[in-house]
Amino acid sequence: MRYLRSQILLLFAVAFASSGACAGGLRVTLLADAEVQGDTILLANLLPENASRALRTAAEAISLGAAPQNGSARRFRRDAILAALQSGTLSPSSFLIPEVVTVRRAGRPLTREETLAAIQSALAKSHIADPPEFRSEDLTLDTALEVPGTDAQLEVTQIAFDEAIGRARFRLQPHTAPGANAFYVTARVAPEASAAVSANAARFEPWTSSKTHSAVDSPVLVDPRQFARLHLRSPSADMLLAVKPLQRGHLGETIRVRLPSSGKTLQARVAGKDFLEGVF
C-alpha cells in the first residue's frame, strides 16, 4: 500500500513538472510562407491564425522592411528575423523561426479588359480624329504583370503608331503597384482603319520623344549585350521570340537581330525597351 501511494505521488510530481515546463517553454511557430497586402512587412504577418490578440498587437510594431512588388516575393533568413526581434519588445526565445521565411505580396494578373479601358480613355483625351476601335483580343501584353486587387489606375504615358507593321503601341504605368515598371501593349489595327490612323499618325505620338529629339539623342532601348523579344508576324502566324540584337537600337530604328535557335539573321524595328517588331 505504501509502495502504491509512493508511485501515485511520483506520477503527480512528473505530471506537474511536465506541465510547468510546457507552460514556461511554450513558443509560437512563425509561418514559413506568408502573404502581405500593404507596403510594409510586419512580424504580425508571420504569426499563425491562432496567435493571441496581445501578441499580434505587439508584433505589429516590429517591421521587417518593405513589401515586395506585386506578384513577387522576399525571403528572410532566421538571423534577419532574430535581429528584428532583438530591436523590439518581444523576446526571440518566444518564437520558433524557420530557417527561411518567404513573404509574397498579394496580387492579381492584369487583365486585357482594364488595359483596353485605359487605352480607350487615353485616345479619347488626345482628341484624335476617328481613333481606331480596339478589342481586348487585339492586344498583346509584353509582360505578365500583377497588380493589387483594387483598381490598378493605369495611365497611358506614350502612344506610337507604326504603319509598316500595322501596329499601335502603348506605354502604360500602373499607379497602385509601387515599384512596378512601365509596360508596353501592342494592338493590331484593322486594315480598314489603317488609312485613318496613318492620317493622324502625328497626333498619335503626343508623348513620344521622336518629335523633339533625333534617334541619336534618344535612349538606347536595345543593346547587343542582352537578349530582346521580337514580335514577328505574317499573314498566317503571330510569334514572340527571344533574339540576340547585333547592334544598338533607338526607338523606331531598324536593326539586325539573330535567332539563337537557328542562327538566322533578321531585320526588326525597335518598338520599346528590349522589344522589337517585324514581319515576314
Image (cartoon, helix red, strand yellow):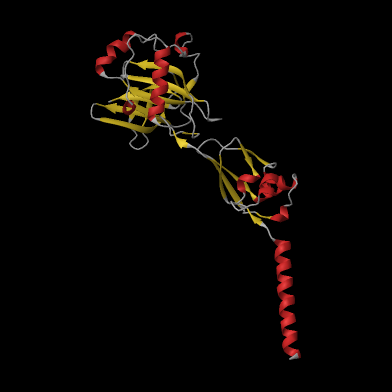
Residue 68: x, y in percent? 57, 37
- State whether residue 84 is above or below residue 154: below
The residue that appears at 71% across and 70% down in the rendered structure is 18
Whether residue 111 is situated above or below residue 164 in the rendered picture = below
Quarter of the figure that contains the C terminus: top left
| Residue 220: x %, y % from top left | 49, 21
**Is residue 60 in view?**
yes
Query: What residue is shown at x 52% (from left), y 36% (from top)?
Result: 70
Image point 32% across, 21% down: which residue? Answer: 134
Is residue 253 visible to us here? no
Q: Which of 48 and 135 is in front in this view?
A: 48
In this orientation, which residue lies closer to the viewer: 221 or 207? 207
Task: Judge by depth and name the residue closer to the eye, 48 or 147.
Answer: 48
The quadrant in which residue 171 appears is top left
Please state if 71 lies on the left or on the right of 121 as rendered.
right
Relative to 2, residue 159 above or below: above
- Residue 107 x %, y %: 49, 37
Residue placed most toward the observer, 111 or 60? 60
- Name of the residue lying farthest toward the bottom: 1
The total number of labels drawn is 0
In the depicted structure, whether residue 217 falls above or below residue 21: above
Q: Residue at x 66, y 48 (%)?
A: 53
Q: Position of residue 50 (x, y in %)?
A: 60, 53
